[in-house]
Amino acid sequence: MRLSLDWLAEFVDLPALSDLTERLEMSGFEDVFVEATGPDLSAIRVGRVETCEPHPDADRLRLCGVDVGQGERHPIVCGAPNVAAGQKVAVALPGTRLPDGTKLTKAKIRGQVSMGMICSRRELGLGDEHEGILVLDAEAPLGTALSDVIAAGPRVLEIGLTPNRGDAASLLGLGRELQALFPGPLRLPESSPEERGAPAADAISLQIDAPEACHHYVARIVRGLRVEPSPAWLVERLEASGIRPVNNVVDVTNLVLLEFGQPLHAFDLKTLRDARVIVRFAEAGEVLATLDGQSRKLDPEDLVIADGERAIALAGVMGGAETEVGDGTRDVLIESAHFAPGTVRFAARRHGLHSEASYRFERGVDPQGVARAADRAARLLAELAGGEVAAGRVEATGRALPEPPEIRFDVAHANRLLGTAYSEPQAVAWLERVGITCESRGNEGLVCRGPSHRHDLELPEDLIEEVARIGGYEKIPTTLPVAELAPATLPAGWRLADQARDSLAGLGFSESMSMPFTSARDLAALRLEESDPRRQPLVLSNPIQEQEGLLRTTLVPSLLRIARQNLSRQLERVRIFETCKVFLSQGGAEEPAEPRVACALLAGNTERRLWAPEPAPPIFFEARGSAERLFSSLGYVASFRSGEIAPYLHPGAGAEIHVEGSTVGAVGELHPEVAAAFEIEVPCALLEVNLDALLELEPGGRRFREVSREPAVHRDLAVLVERGQAAEELLAVVRKAAGADLISVELFDRYEGSKLPEGQVSLAFHLVFQRADRSLTDDEVSKRMDRVLRKLTGSFGATLR
């Protein structure tokens, strides 16, 4: 926000600029600095005319001896009639460049050497006056830069406001703040207008049909005014604040906006139909032509100002073109109102309109200042536009605003939080400086209530912040806290997710971090049934992008899009993963389920085999191997079984992942239809793990075995079983039946063909037996192999091949 510092000085006594900017920044405002506008006068010096004699060869010229603090007199020829000895003047010496670009040099004027110029206002770029020189204050320090003595233009205070301090977005608001920081009087401009003529209520009727969105509406009527350019002082103040001058009527509304922080709007009174003003919500399909030349289709949630037939303004945001004040306007209606911040905020965002008015309404204006601002605008219009203010205001009220809340304040609690030792009277004095009323209520302690313009004061901590701000953050002593600190530990879910990240990164996957949004199109492309919870996402009420207006129920679409983007840039091999929460609706439950999941994607070539003649294995096996190593690193023993895998996985190349009999994930190749929908043209596999489900299971931990010095015994076993029998189930039986001396078992061959009985398949296992204390005999190993075969026969009807 930008405001003229000289204008602010009319409201409150200002300290030195360095104290002003430092104190405002230390009290919570951002990027505070003062900008000097106008020409650069730093090269012009303050001089004193020591002598002033007539020029020997010219009647209208004077030959002056001027001291600029360098210990010598400079002869300067001057033609100004008001130059005299003893004056402090603005001096430009040879080499100085004036604001108009002229560079001064040593010159001879009518035979006399002139070593510079004594400057007038026009030569300094400070105005059009040039008949006489600029005479400075007698106390101006000799030899200093002129820019340190006079302001070349309005000094502008630029200050960044935090969203909770909308009350400071005006001269009055900053004046209150400075009055609290530097105690002194607060001066307000005169607001009460001189009323004449017929009552305003005879000219217009007012009604509020949306009481929840408009709490107070005030109208003032000014008749017989002239619309013309604003005076120079008003233009200067608006331009210093970054507002473009329009005409005296519009400029007055903006002036009052800057003074009091209350947005106003002026309507051409004769354009209002049926002499009515109605505050209501827009009708379906209603269109409003706004002042920026756009026709806007209104939403039923848009609050509008209407006359008897149509909408004439988007309340709190922008006026309508049909009621705009123009050169032919003679009578105006001044609107001052208090609109609900949320209503204005959503309308401004919906239509992409952000104005000085909406900026303030969104942050909340002072409900007590509505009438005062209308009065002030009417008074100024009478003064600057020659109008007559109609008698009385026309007012209507909507739903009453709640009183500012009562807040209990405990100075001991404040001192504990701040590390200070403030007394209660001291803290109360600082609170009262910002308009907070404090009342001692015996056992209840100190009860405080904020002023109507401070909407950010709701909690005891807000009052503690005010004490710290006004008392001075920089004055709070540095004290180290004394407390017993317990070791910080992450929640178990976070630790498991971190372990999964580390493991997948160690396996060569790159972590991706995408937005938690998806689209109905992406979910449909996954071939999910309509009844699947993953097909019933939560809908965002205000999405960042319309095409991604849902909270994602699975990480698969995000990873597929990232993979497609990388593959389109000629990356031959993509290995990525993401761990985060997904959001699943739970029927009538208010809150969705938010399980934390990990999802990894493999696309493109498996490990390059530049020297190996055999082809690379299918990508499914790489994905399964990654799953095995992931679960092993997390301390779980995983098994892989065929089952009802996700519909976006290939039915012939996928498996469920089980731990202790519970399904905790899935692994498999991407279904061809899904691959086509996401434009994935290379082999692709997915690995999904529900980390929350895994967390509920007890990890088996890692078992370490002593390296045996004894020889290992290797045996192979081939059995015939029914086609479709999962090898993982046979492996589980083998491990249990073989006993503790079995150190490893793996499936190394699967065969089916015409030489085998119909409907049967041959599975071959390689078993390794070993003990740490002694060598195993063939007889011992054979007995274990016999027991394994009996168990396989009993469980699956397996026969030895």
Image (cartoon, grey):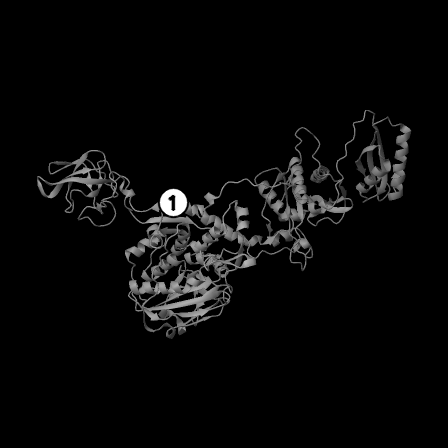
Give the number of marks: 1
Asked where in the image residue 709 lies, by quadrant, the reply is top right
Asked where in the image residue 224 lies, by quadrant, the reply is bottom left
**Above or below, 203 relative to 298:** below
Nearer to the camera, 775 or 717: 775
For this view, does 125 lie left or right of residue 491? left
> Could you say where residue 283 lies in the image, as x and y percent from the top left?
49, 68
> Could you say where residue 411 lies in the image, as x and y percent from the top left?
52, 51
> Could you say where residue 782 lies in the image, as x and y percent from the top left?
90, 32
> Could you say where residue 657 lies in the image, as x and y percent from the top left?
74, 44
Which residue is drawn at the image coordinates 37% and 72% (left, top)? 200
Nearer to the camera, 35 or 774: 35
Q: Is residue 28 visible?
A: no
Query: What amino acid is labelled 1 in the image?
Result: Asp
The furthest residue to the top: 709
**Above or below, 665 relative to 780:** below
Q: Is residue 379 visible?
A: yes
**Above or below, 19 relative to 385:** above
For this view, does 630 lie left or right of residue 8? right
The furthest residue to the front: 442
Q: Secondary structure at mark 1?
A: helix
Near mark 1 (Cα within 10 A), the count class, few <14, some 14-19 or many ≥20, is few
**Above or below, 112 relative to 5:** above
Which residue is drawn at the image coordinates 85% and 27% (left, top)? 773
Q: What residue would you read off at disc 1?
A: 19
State which quarter of the image contains the C terminus: top right
Asked where in the image residue 578 lies, by quadrant, the reply is top right
